[in-house]
Image: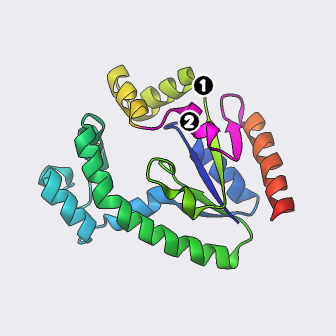
Amino acid sequence: MILGVTGGIASGKSTVTRMLESLGAAVVSADELAREVVRPGAEPLQELVRRFGRDILLPDGNLDRQALGKRIFADPEARNDLNRILHPAIGELSRKRLREAAARNRLVVYEVPLLFEVGAEGRVDAVLVVTVSEDLQRRRLEERDGLSPEEVDARIASQLPQEEKVARADFVVDNSGSLEQTKAQVNEIFARLMTES
């Protein structure tokens, strides 16, 4: 069984994924795959440089994710270009990694922030959406990423609204409370998945 874990920015997807991993699930992370497809010399990185310029690179030739992030969250057309360049490569690599993991593990978690936005729900058997209160989400973004209120608005607006994700979910974890409360929800879902699979 492949479980897609998604949710809004700063909702706690990685926290929930780590909890599932500690219970025995294998994990494939779309963010890690995204880093892999833009390593120096990779074609997607060269295409990003052609589109956005060399100032998106660090001195060592790696992608400056922060510099690119500032550009794409402020410009929907730039974000569409980024997705057009990266998502086919990430999709191809994710299908390969998910097949490999599913052959060896009873439960595979595919952590993918933009699961619905990129149409990747077809790669998973069920979807778990991690939610968080809007106040907490905004506070986390400001503190974690050092963003201004305007940058927070742009990042939240760049994703599907939380309610839409919840409407399409098989499972929901509310990560607005304590870690213990989140863990209790995750344990319950894990037990159900193990029973059903």
Q: Residue at x 66, y 61 (%)?
A: 125
- In the rendered image, which residue does mark 2 sit on? 164
Q: Is residue 35 left or right of residue 53?
A: right
Residue in the picture at 53% in, 73% down: 97
Frontmost residue, 22 versus 151: 151
Disc 1 marks a residue whose amino acid type is Ser
**Residue picked out by circle 1:** 133
Quadrant containing the C terminus in the rendered view:
bottom right
The furthest residue to the right: 195
SS for dot 2 = helix
Percent x, y for residue 122?
56, 61
Q: Determine whether the residue tagged by mark 1 lies in a helix, strand or loop.
A: loop
Residue 152 in picture, x, y percent from top left:
39, 27
The stretch drawn in magenta includes residue 97: no
Rounded to the nearest whole Å, what is the CA distance between mark 2 and mark 1?
15 Å
Residue 82's x, y, as percent?
28, 52
Q: Residue at x 59, y 78 (%)?
A: 100
Describe residue 52's horizontal placement relative to residue 82 as left or right. left
Report the quarter where the N terminus lies: bottom right
Q: Residue at x 13, y 59 (%)?
A: 50
